[in-house]
Amino acid sequence: MTLKRVFALVPGLGALTLAACSTVTSITSIAQKDEPQPTLAGTYLAANFAAAEGDVKAASNFYANTLKDDPDNEDLLARTFLYAAESGNIDQASALSDRVLTQDPTNRPAHLVREMSAMQKKDYAAVLKEVAEPNPIAFAALTNDVIEAWAHAGLHDTDGALHALDALSQQRGVDGLRLMHKALILEYSGRDKDAEAAYREAIAFTGMGPRAADAFGRFLRRHGRADEAKAIYTKSLSESPGNPVAAAALREIAANKSTAPLVASPAEGAAEALFGIAASLNDQRSADVAILYLNLTLYLHPDFDLARVLLANHYETLRKFDLANSLYGGIGSSSPYYVMTQVQAAINDGRMDKPEMGATKLKALSAQQPKDLDVWTALGDLYRSGDHYVEAASAYDKAIAVLPDGDRRLVGLYYARGVSRGNSNRWNDAEKDFQSALKINPDRADVLNYLGYSWVERGQHLDEAVAMLEKAHALRPLDGFIADSVGWAYYRLGRYQDAARALEEAVQLAPGAPDVNDHLGDAYWRVGRKTDARFQWQHALALQPDAKQKPVIERKLQFGLDEVSASGQ
């Protein structure tokens, strides 16, 4: 199961207003009176740079060091607090929260950090005092209500907890969260009959969502009802194929293993709430808030692996792959998420130009999981991205062997292996792979394009190749590279007017591609538009073509196409 599908394992919430979570402004110029002294300027500028780059951990460290030497600077205090919280250093943020609230009593993140610090210390009375202040912003009120409920649960005031949850019924789109936490609190409080009814009500409302299914499945297993739990997990797995939690639970049931409740303490309950809210914040505007909530989640419940996965995904969106991998590194081998996160960490290694490190991870993982499709596919992709085509084809062999004949997932694997074989001097085998892919899915545009273009380049099956390329273009009319393939096929067939028209369209769709502009220049030359041809070649040269293409374009500019023996022409 891939990480994209894992994110379906969290409960959804309706749209919420995020204004209550506004904190300090983004990194901008600061008034002269607030600037650090010159001796601090280097550290301060380093902090600003790290913040602007989205490196919250580095920014937190730099701001903290600057604040030590300029402790009365209010702007530095606010920034140091914010980046400490967003980098997961909640103890440091908590130590600063009183000072932040002294200068800004409405600072919502500071209140939230103080609430979670008290929750972690089991000081439930302090939590209740913190959330007692009414907040007109729906998002803040939602968080406060569910945290208040778990604080009451910590004080063994179940009725008070349920009353706090009832306040959520006044907000739209949060009934799933309310019903889920009602069931969790009733189970925590030992009111098993009411808890079971609440779980059934939650599932009836939200459907067999994996989080609710796991909570209820654990409840049933703990009460000696393994067969009923098995039915719950089986249904969840059928609705979310590949769900690693359900698959692991079914293995544990078969082995007659015991289990813990999904939530075993008020701190874990609050963590579950923060996680659920963070999971609903999908737009870029809310990324900072989601990161803050997820770091607080892990502060309260360090073993919450799905929260680690979601936080890592946010860091990947920010292209902070090292931060993502540090989170994946905290997921143990016994976790249902271990294999998929190791695969993702290896992919991130490739993104950080460390393909050997990624390949090492995946080869070690393949020894443990020799039948895991995602492991072999990722290894093949990693090798292929580094032009190690022989090794890539071998990895794809293993992935293909896992799947039954006719499985639609084979289409992408046949295509990837075909590309790898074609680039390792095994064209006949590559051709068979592309044809096998099209036999399963005759409308796969990228396969039609690759095979058709390859045939054109080789001067083989030209009529069939053109038909393939025209079909691919019809399937993906906005793909400039497929439009280029069509135009180049016309060119190779001597249909220069058709080629010029098709390649003009291709340049409009992919204006930054040097090879597409080069092709259009060639077509213009053949139809007598030599000035236009030279313009396109100059443009292609400005777009930094590869080392093989560049000297050919330079010679065409100097001598003209007729005097140049270009590859394939």
Image (cartoon, rainbow, N blue to C red):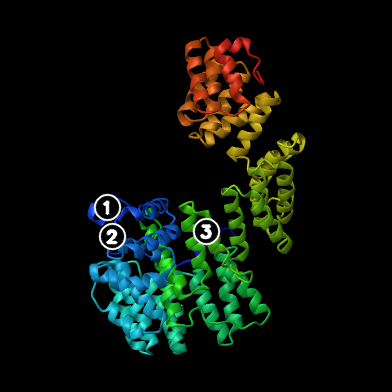
Residue that label 2 marks: 75
Q: Earlier in the sequence, mark 1 or mark 2?
A: 1
Residue positioned most to the front: 39
Q: Quadrant of the C terminus?
A: top right
Inspect the image, locate mark 3, and give the three-letter code of the amino acid beneath it: Ala
Q: Which mark is residue 253?
A: none
Residue 287 lies left or right of residue 137; in this view the side is right
Residue that label 1 marks: 30
Distance (Cα) linking label 1 and label 3: 31 Å
Q: Position of residue 504 (x, y in %)?
A: 48, 23
| Camera sees residue 339 | yes
Q: Tell me: residue 549, above or below residue 225.
A: above
Q: Quadrant of the N terminus?
A: bottom right
The structure residue drawn at horizontal position 59% and vertical position 63%, both measured from the top left corner, is 241
Q: Earlier in the sequence, mark 3 or mark 2?
A: 2
Inspect the image, locate mark 1, and give the three-letter code of the amino acid beneath it: Ile
Residue that label 3 marks: 324
Q: Earlier in the sequence, mark 1 or mark 3?
A: 1
Inspect the image, locate mark 2, and give the three-letter code of the amino acid beneath it: Asp
Residue 161 lies left or right of residue 395; in this view the side is left
In terms of secondary structure, where does tag 2 sit?
A: helix
Residue 385 lies left or right of residue 125; in this view the side is right
| Camera sees residue 104 | no
